[in-house]
């Protein structure tokens, strides 16, 4: 079935790095843009980053720009989020999500979500 | 950019209709037909309920409908059921390559 599964979360000290991964299956991964969305404990959803289906473009929320890097490997059907210079406010559940429309219109809805992986930034 | 504005909570009795608003600006909700609505139960991932302002994904109940007037989008749930209780988030494209979410609305079925 169509699914995405996140991994790589954990506890990390402020200023350190962590790399999250998202494994996709059941669909043609290379045809869809992908997002990372996060949710701080007890808070709402916050968009983090998007990458085009072919990896040609990537965009970030101001809160993570310059610290996080989104990437993908279409040969392995995987999406990554490299998180550097982590801060306490980066704590939360990180979801990867598929763009609803293949090859374009990357901001017009996310129709497949993983269960999330938890990141805790604490000393 | 600031988050889109949603009421913190909305409640209704079974069978009633409720409407959740999502207020943005002319730079996001008012310009792009890229408003989506998500339902989230505690501890679970969000689920897409409405996309492109008014469209329902396959499998989503016709009790869910979306609309927009100016810079405010709305989600209406008709024939409210116990299973509709949860959190609802709107999102909109903002600027060329940014996405904004609303702060979320807790729906309570009385």
Image: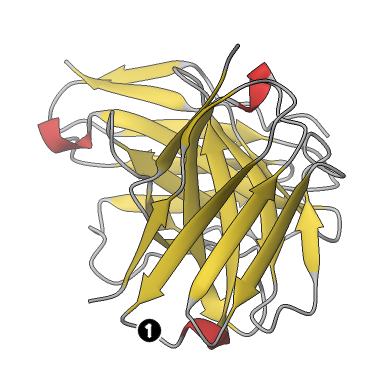
Residue A32 horizontal side relative to residue B33, left or right: left
Q: Is residue A44 above or below residue A108?
A: above
Front position in the image: A121 or A33: A121
Q: Is residue A71 above or below residue A89?
A: below
Residue B14 location (% of width, % of height)? 13, 28
Where the N terminus of chain B falls, by quadrant?
top right
Q: Can residue B45 be seen in this snapshot?
A: yes
Chain letter, disc 1 residue: A
Residue occupied by mark 1: A27
Q: Which quadrant holds residue A83?
A: top right
Residue B60 location (% of width, % of height)? 26, 61
Residue B2 horizontal side relative to residue A44, left or right: right
Q: Is residue A113 above or below residue A45?
A: below
Where the C terminus of chain B falls, by quadrant?
top left
Q: Which residue: 70% across, 31% down? A: A16
Q: Which quadrant holds residue A114?
A: bottom left
Q: Which residue: 42% across, 46% down? A: B38
The residue carrying pointer 1 sits among few (fewer than 14), some (14 to 19) or many (20 or more) residues within 10 Å by Cα, namely few
Front position in the image: A84 or A70: A84
Residue B85 horizontal side relative to residue A23, left or right: left
Q: Which residue: 41% across, 54% down? A: A6
Q: Residue furthest top?
A: A123
Give the tally of numbered discs: 1
Front position in the image: A43 or B2: A43
Residue A59 location (% of width, % of height)? 79, 58
Q: Which quadrant holds residue B9?
A: top left
């Amino acid at each position: 079935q169509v699914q995405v599964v996140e991994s790589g979360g954990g506890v990390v000290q402020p200023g350190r790095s962590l790399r999250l991964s998202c494994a996709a299956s059941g669909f043609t991964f290379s045809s869809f843009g992908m997002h990372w969305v996060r949710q701080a404990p007890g808070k709402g959803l916050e968009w983090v980053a998007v990458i085009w289906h072919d990896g040609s473009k990537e965009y970030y929320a101001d809160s993570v720009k310059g610290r996080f890097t989104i990437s993908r490997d279409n040969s392995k059907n995987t999406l990554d989020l490299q998180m550097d210079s982590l801060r306490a406010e980066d704590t939360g559940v990180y979801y990867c999500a598929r763009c609803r429309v293949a090859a374009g219109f990357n901001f017009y809805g996310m129709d497949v979500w993983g269960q999330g992986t938890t990141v805790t930034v604490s000393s | 950019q600031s988050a889109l504005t949603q009421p913190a909570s909305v409640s209704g009795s079974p069978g009633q209709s409720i409407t959740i608003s999502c207020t943005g600006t002319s730079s996001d909700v008012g310009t792009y037909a890229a408003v989506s609505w998500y339902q989230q139960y505690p501890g679970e991932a969000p689920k897409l309920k409405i996309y492109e302002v008014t469209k329902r994904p396959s499998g989503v109940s016709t009790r869910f409908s979306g609309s927009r007037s100016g810079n405010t989008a709305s989600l209406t749930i008709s024939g409210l059921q116990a299973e509709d209780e949860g959190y609802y988030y709107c999102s909109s494209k903002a600027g060329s390559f940014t996405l904004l979410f609303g702060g979320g609305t807790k729906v309570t079925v009385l």
